[in-house]
Amino acid sequence: MIRSFEKITGNYVTEIKGQNKFGYYLTSFVDFYDMREISDYYGGIIRFYDFETGKVYEPFEVKRNVLYGEPLFYDGKLYFLKADFNEKMISLYRYYPEKECEVIFRIETDKVNLYNLKVMGDKVHVTSQDSVFTCYYPEKTSFVIGERETVDYIDGDKIYCSEWQEEQNEETGEYKYFEYLIIRDFRGTILNRQLGSLMQRHDGSLFIG
């Protein structure tokens, strides 16, 4: 049997890791970084779906030059970024449909790196990364990461990164792609480096493959 949500839009609903009640839809045609080159944009949509009740929630109406980031579930609430390029502000929202929608952190757009700006971690961290990883909330830190390195997860006082590698045997042509797991502290110091790729299941548990 196929169940239906109360509002059908034809958009794919993505499950939010760490719980099984809510999914979401987010317009992804333009991201925060793209807005540096765009003078006017129709506006983004963030929509939440309740798998248990079938209800659909849109906490904000579409507004020109306003975009949203992917949500994170933590401590029974949903967290996401709202970027208002009219006001030139990034806001972190804590949200639970029909109960709570409040700003818990704000920062000006010119004080953040908009590249890969998102919420992440076992708790709620606002971060960005390119050649430099920066955390803006709840504490500020910044350090250089490797050119093949990406920060994937934050767990307590540890930052988990993946470093991709590739090898090709010149004689046989055999190609191998694999990853190393790098664990850093909040100063960027490497605590451990091992062969492995980190994954997070929808229940929030972590595995190394």
Image (cartoon, rainbow, N blue to C red):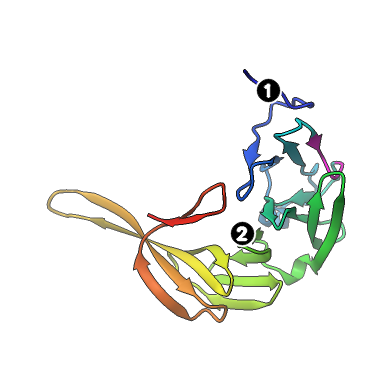
Q: Quadrant of residue 169?
A: bottom left
Residue 208, placed above or below residue 19:
below
Give the overall secondary structure of the magenta segment: loop
Name the kind of residue labelled 2 in the image. Asn
**In the structure shown, which secondary structural element does the residue marked by tag 2 occupy?**
loop
Sort mark 1 into few (<14), some (14-19) or many (20+) by Cα contacts within 10 Å.
few
Residue range highlighted in magenta:
56-61
Q: Identify the residue shown where x is 75% and y is 25%.
A: 8
Outermost residue on the top side: it is: 1
* Cα separation between marks 1 and 2: 35 Å
Residue 52, placed above or below residue 120:
above
Name the kind of residue labelled 1 in the image. Arg
Horizontally, residue 27 falls left or right of residue 193, namely: right
Q: Tell me if residue 198 can be seen.
A: no
Q: Earlier in the sequence, mark 1 or mark 2?
A: 1
Q: Identify the residue shown where x is 87% and y is 41%.
A: 61
Which quarter shows the C terminus?
bottom left
Foreground of the two, 78 or 112: 78
Q: Nearer the viewer, mark 1 or mark 2?
A: 1
Residue tagged by mark 2?
116
Q: Quadrant of residue 28?
A: top right
Q: Which numbered circle lies on residue 3?
A: 1
Q: Tell me if residue 156 can be seen.
A: yes
Foreground of the two, 182 or 31: 182
The location of residue 79, given as percent across then percent down, is 73, 55
Horizontally, residue 11 falls left or right of residue 67, namely: left
The location of residue 132, given as percent across then percent down, is 56, 72
The location of residue 183, given as percent across then percent down, is 46, 72
**In the structure shown, which secondary structural element does the residue marked by tag 1 occupy?**
loop
Q: Identify the residue shown where x is 80% and y is 66%.
A: 105
Q: Is residue 46 magenta?
A: no
